[in-house]
Amino acid sequence: MEDNTLTQEVKPPDTSKGPVRWLRDNLFSTWYNTILTCLGLVLLFFFFRVFFIWVFTQANWAVIPAYLRTLMIGPYPIEQVWRIGIVFCTLLTLLGLSAGIWRDRVLQIAIAIAGVGLFLLLIPLDVVKEGEDTSATLEFNLNIFYLIFFKRKWLLGGLVLLAVTFLIGRDKNTFKRWIIIGWVLSFPWTMIILHGFGKNAVSTTDWGGLLLTLILAAVGIVACFPLGVLLALGRRSQLPAIKWVSTVYIETIRGVPLITILFMGSILLPIFMPGDFQLDKVIRAMVALTLFSSSYMAENIRGGLQAVPSGQVEAAQAVGLTYPKTMHFIVLPQAIRAVIPAIVGQSIALFKDTSLVSVVGLLDLLGVGRTILGSSKWSGNYAEVWFFIAIIYFVFSFSMSIVSQKIEADLGVGKH
Amino acid sequence: MRKFLFRVSALVLAISLVTPLLADNHESVLDKVKNRGKLVCGVHGGLPGFGYLGEDGKWSGFDADFGRAIAAAVLGDPDKVEFVPLNAAERFTALQTGEIDVLIRNTTWTLTRDADLNTDFAPPTFYDGQGFMVPKSLNIKSIKELAGATIGVTGGSTTELNLADTMRSLGIDFKPLTYSDIDTLYNGYDAGRVDAVTSDKSQLVARRKNLKNPDDHVILDVTISKEPLGPLTIHGDNKWNDAVSWVVYATFFAEEHKITQENVKSFETENPEIKRFLGESGEMGKILGLPKDWAKQVIIAVGNYGEIFERNLTPIGLPRGINKPWTEGGLLYSMPFR
């Protein structure tokens, strides 16, 4: 009897892994979970069936290649597109050099961008023209070569440039300072090159599409940061005047929807302007976006400032650091590091918010989408156009999100 | 320090008060356009046939072509024009503040807009009117038969007011269903959520093409409002308004006399009025402050009214209707070139 108990078999703990185990644990653990899973699958099946039938048989995607250039750059004149090429090359050169010097994350970002470029280079998006037979394979392949080497020469050149500048920049650490200066100057440079001078100047009313969306987002994100820091510090200031001005500013802007600020900028501001003085429409939108996002940025940063223990400031004062030095070396680095996720979240939100400028008559990505629907040939294809635009917004927002997660991991936010 | 700040702010205040007075020098927009070498024209951001971006990334449409015609008349080059897409709310502000020189954006000429809004109208380029579209299967022939129907309309527009006014005066009971956006309006109509849809006839025609079965829908003959659409200039600038008006008349005149984009360069005539029109005699250009051959340039650039119409509006299925020369029973009547 006793022998029997000693040799009683004890089952080993179930350590099986793999998809079957996961399914059983998560989807079919109880009878009601099984029913819910089946219901969910049926719903998903019907949704995706309708979706795929639309995507592959009903949608007329010819509208996208027909309007691809307009979606990318709006009514920017074709004779002046080389300007965009120069800006493109400048940014890629800077990126390539930075990737060579800093490696790590910058290199990863560069590789990701190169990957997207390669993907765009190889997909035969605009080979398929309406009513054309693409089954003739030889011609099809020739078409791809033609596309890569002639029609997409900018893309191909950009990829080569990125690789070459990476090789040049490898381990040239002495260049660091110059590269940073280059990045700072790249912004005014971009604006000047895109606009140009004299007879061939391209007015900002001709900027459009993804180009305008990216410019507006970049200006908003970059310019709101210093303003936000100043406002956050101002709100915590000991001086009542500064404190109240900052507080009133932040609370007023935060209490108003972005669309009303854009309308103020586009309709009321010109009325207040003296005489013949005209402020450019795009610049008015930039100002509105910057003013709007800076108040949110200020609150984000204020959150970070509060997270810095007061002992840090007291210690800095004890060693005799002045206020600017305390902020610059002690407080802000810790404060900003703590709120990077919030800052990136806000940048993504701002990127998407730029689509509101289409309501005040700017031709950003969404605005171009609207005007395509005014073309009598394509006005029935709005679903295709909106779907394509949604994908572009998603790709950009999602990439920003991934980059921010990597940066957070690097900085060890939330770990120490 | 405080004294210094006070002085600076006083100076800033003084400058901001004086600047508008200095800048206000009553220069005609015509001269501004000539000096700038470029016309700035406000258009609709996306209206089938009237204003939209073409596949080549250039502004196209009926309204955009009239912008090009003005640029050709004033500057001799139809490409010297910059188009600014505007929404309904900001269009008048843009004109009043001088952000644009001329507004050609499907704007109905009304008394209040003409007299109260600090704007002047040039002759209408398109006579539109509000109508109804119904499915053929309902077998409706007149507006009276719409009694009890649900009618789709875009909210906050004169369209909505016209509908209510007309139905009330006829004593017809109906259910309005307002949509905020025209895409959802026509989607709702196509899905059968409303029995009829009302809008400007040009829009009804353009949108009917995109319904699932266009042939199953019919636009009623009845027109419940007058919508004369034309270019606008700022109030009180007669010189500029004259120039814009006569560019419009030139397109009417050319169609009346069969002058086309093709034959204008070699058009031979003994008719003294046509000679004046082409700039071969008289001083029509000088009087308007335009080059001698301004009307010729307009026709070279965009053609006569009929050609502009056929290029932009015929493809979306719009009939000429009342937008025909007066000689053919329409409303297009050019004032004499004398």
Image (spheres, rainbow, N blue to C red):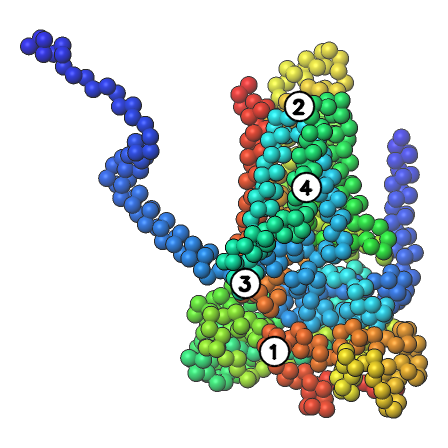
Name the mark nearer the viewer: 4 or 3.
Answer: 3
Q: Give me the residue at 77% from left, 18% from top.
A: A322
- The disc numbered 3 marks a residue on which chain? A
Q: Nearer the viewer, residue A93 or B120?
A: A93
Q: Residue furthest top?
A: A2
Q: Is residue A269 visible?
A: no
The amino acid at mark 2 is Pro
Instruction: Report how far apart the C-alphas of labels 4 and 1 lie in the structure.
Output: 47 Å
- For label 4, count other residues whose C-alpha is less than 10 Å away and answer few (under 14), some (14-19) or many (20+): many
Dot 4 and dot 3 within a common chain: yes
Name the mark nearer the viewer: 2 or 4.
Answer: 4
Q: Which element carries disc 3, helix, strand or loop?
A: loop
- B219 lies above or below B104: below
Instruction: Report how far apart the C-alphas of labels 3 and 2 lie in the structure.
Output: 59 Å
Residue bearing mark 2 = A333
- The disc numbered 4 marks a residue on which chain? A
Q: Which mark is residue A132?
A: 3
Q: Give me the residue at 31% from left, 38% from top.
A: A27
Residue bearing mark 1 = B318
Q: Which mark is residue A232?
A: none
